[in-house]
Amino acid sequence: MLTIIQTLLLLIGVVRFFVIAHFIMSWLIRFEVLNVRQEFVGQVWYGLQRILEPIYSRVRRFMPDLGGVDLSPIVVLIGLEILRIFLYNNAGSFLH
């Protein structure tokens, strides 16, 4: 059971990294520091979009419309952190 918990924590860490990278890239693209017409930047950006959009779209269904502000990455990060805390705090009970 410990292996399953460790695997879930690893996946949470990977998704957290992707969300943070996507969030930072979105700001850099918005302020024209990065350009999606550059091949590498475009590949990374659209790859992250394809990975994270299914998660974001589920979160956006429950959030009010805030105009042009998208808070779904923050909500996803908070949800991942709550899940990580739950797994850490209850790991001992899964081992019995």
Image (cartoon, rainbow, N blue to C red):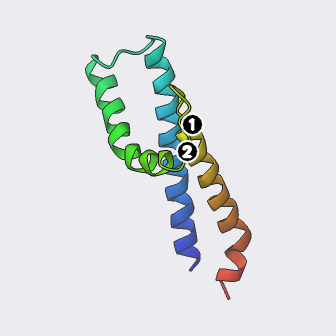
Query: Mark number for residue 71?
Result: 1
**Where 95 sits versus 71, above or below?**
below
- Position above or below: 22 against 54: above
Crowd band around label 1 with a 10 angstrom C-alpha radius: few (<14), some (14–19), many (20+)? some
Amino acid on which disc 1 is placed: Leu
In this rendering, the answer to whether 5 lies above or below 40 is below
Q: Amino acid at mark 2?
A: Met
Q: Residue furthest top?
A: 32
Do the residues under discs 2 and 1 have CB atoms within 8 angstroms? yes
* 92 left or right, relative to 31: right
Q: Image quadrant for the C terminus?
A: bottom right
Q: Residue at x 48, y 18 (%)?
A: 28
Q: Give the quadrant of residue 95.
A: bottom right
Residue in front for this viewpoint, 22 or 76:
76
Residue that badge 2 annotates = 63
Look at 51% across and 31% down and name the residue there.
Answer: 23
Instruction: Specify whether 91 is left or right of 62.
Output: right
Q: Quadrant of residue 64?
A: top right
Image location (x, y in percent) of residue 13: 55, 51
Task: Identify the residue shown where x is 59% and y is 54%.
Answer: 80
- The answer to which of marks 2 and 1 sits earlier in the sequence is 2
- For the residue pair 65 and 78, the one nearer the viewer reads as 65
Q: Residues within 10 Å of mark 2 (few under 14, many from 20)?
A: few
Pick the front one: 71 or 43: 71
Badge 1 marks a residue whose secondary structure is loop
Q: Is residue 54 left or right of residue 19?
A: left
The residue located at (36%, 30%) in the rendering is 45
Residue 8, position in %: x, y?
53, 64
Q: Secondary structure at mark 2?
A: loop
| Percent x, y of residue 22 | 46, 33
Q: Is residue 93 left or right of residue 24?
A: right
Tell me how far mark 2 sits from mark 1, CA to CA.
Answer: 8 Å
